Image (cartoon, helix red, strand yellow):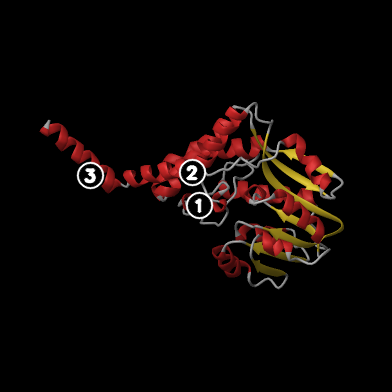
Amino acid sequence: MPILSFLLGVLLTWLFMSGLMAQGLALLIRIWWPSSSHERGLKVDQWLLNNPVQPSSGWRLPGYWKDTHEYRQACAEMAGLLADKACLSTRDEVLDVGFTSHDQLLVWLDYYQVQHLTAIASDEQLMVRALEHCGHYNTLKLVRGGEKSLAERPEHSCDKLIALDCVYQLESRSHFFSHAHKVLRPGGTLAFTDMVLARPFQDRREQRLINILGRISGLLVEDMPVKESYENLLLQHGFKQVEILDITDDVLSGFCFWFGQHYQSLCAFTRSKMWIRLRLQVWFIRWMLHREQLRYVMIITR
């Protein structure tokens, strides 16, 4: 008995000193106290930005992996695909809602050379980084605030509205579409990406299970629309032409595969709290993909 008590004490001391006990408690808290609205989406953080294999970047996207195996390139390809589908040009006044890094602003400004870009940042740190890397562009206007800033934009004030990998983090898609339709000029284009359910829930038991697992992983699915109903949702808010491009395999499947190939070599550069979150999120995405229940889409509508 004394030996058992000694071993138990050693185990508890090791768990405490290694931080595993704190991580376990944090996980239990996530289970019983679901994520807040500020943690609704896939968060890609320090372990990617501090990757020593490649120069540091600010990208925070799942990426588009069709023709690349490099994270930065995958993110740039994702931004470029959305810009191509939106037909960005040098004549466009563009509004970027909820940008997640200054890198995507450089894509619109450098590569597509839009006439004017207004970018809304919901995070103060994003605003600081954007000013540091893009502040010298006189065609760029940075605005603080989230959905409230979009609601306060004047009517018919932009030609193209871009929302790259942020719509599923918003409080209400309905409010977003309503405000987007208001700020677009006649004939203007809304281009965005979103995560949706591939089919309705079979029953309340399945819905409850997926909602709980989604909350634990930090990826809320409770208000995700079903893919088949998305076009009607946009039509109800005044949009006419709707193009829905399913890019699940090249985005979510590609990101999960890349994660599986690199996570062991990169875990040393990851904050422990973020490491647990990433592992849980990737596991949940893989599980949902295996059930054929989660899709990632790119939507262009006018």
Q: Which residue is mark 1?
A: 45
Q: CA distance from mark 3 to mark 1?
A: 29 Å
| Residue 198, image quadrant | top right
Badge 1 crowding class, 10 Å Cα cut-off, few under 14, some 14 to 19, many 20 or more, is some
Q: Earlier in the sequence, mark 1 or mark 2?
A: 1
Q: Position of residue 63 (x, y in %)?
A: 61, 45
Q: Which residue is mark 3?
A: 13
| Between 208 and 94, the one nearer to me in the picture | 208
Q: Earlier in the sequence, mark 3 or mark 1?
A: 3
Question: Height in image: 236 above or below 155?
Answer: above
Question: Do residues under tags 1 and 2 come within 8 Å of each other at their CB atoms?
Answer: yes
| Residue 229, image quadrant | top right
Q: Which residue is mark 2?
A: 278
| Between 197 and 120, the one nearer to me in the picture | 197
What amino acid is at disc 3? Thr
Tag 1's secondary structure?
A: loop
- Quadrant location of the N terminus? top left
Between disc 3 and disc 2, the foreground one is: 3
Badge 3 crowding class, 10 Å Cα cut-off, few under 14, some 14 to 19, many 20 or more, is few
Question: Height in image: 129 above or below 240?
Answer: below
Identify which residue is drawn at 42% across, 40% down.
264
Q: Earlier in the sequence, mark 3 or mark 2?
A: 3
